Amino acid sequence: MRNYESLYIVHPDIVGDELTAVMDKFEKILSDQQAEILKIDNWGVKKLAYPIQKVARGNYIQVVFSAGPEVVAEYERRLRLDEQILRFLTVRLDQVTLDEEEPVAATTRRDSGADDYDDEEE
């Protein structure tokens, strides 16, 4: 099973118990397909970078889960069909991203003609 992070934006008029119901609905979709939910985080209402369907704000919900690719396809299909969801994005995470103790190291590329910088004196 692979690890995924999904971020979806719910219409800002959906608040309180209705928002909780939407979150529970998508949590149930994942759990019914034997996905392991690692984290669900409600980021609250934030301003969108650009209006979507004449809406300038939205509730951001982050879900981190572990599942197979067929589960992600069904989950995204259900997100696409729900009219309360403005946008969504699901990405696969690698193991380094999940380990919070270990920072993600930036990869650097050395040119073949680059000088070596050593602390040793010549």
Image (cartoon, helix red, strand yellow):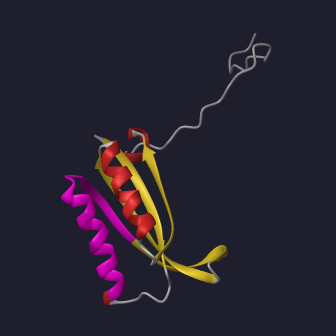
Which quadrant holds the N terminus?
Answer: top left
Q: Quadrant of residue 70?
A: top left
Percent position of residue 8, x then y: 46, 67
User: Is 67 on the left-hand or right-hand side of 99?
Assistant: left
The number of numbered discs placed on residues in the rendered structure image is 0
Percent position of residue 110, x then y: 71, 22
Question: Vertical placement of 53 versus 41: above or below?
Answer: below
The answer to which of 74 and 50 lies nearer the viewer is 74
Residue pushed farthest top?
122
Residue found 42% across the figure and 40% down from its top? 94
Percent position of residue 40, x then y: 33, 66
Percent position of residue 105, x then y: 53, 37
The prevailing secondary structure element of the residues shown in magenta is helix
User: Is 114 on the left-hand or right-hand side of 105?
Assistant: right
Which quadrant holds the C terminus?
Answer: top right
Residue found 31% across the figure and 81% down from its top? 20
Residue pushed farthest front?
81
User: Is 101 on the left-hand or right-hand side of 37?
Assistant: right
The answer to which of 64 and 111 lies nearer the viewer is 64
User: Is 36 on the left-hand or right-hand side of 14?
Assistant: left
Residue found 36% across the figure and 57% down from its top? 64
Q: Quadrant of residue 69?
A: top left
Q: Is residue 40 magenta?
A: yes
Residue found 27% across the figure and 66% down from its top? 27
Which residue range is magenta in the image?
A: 18-41
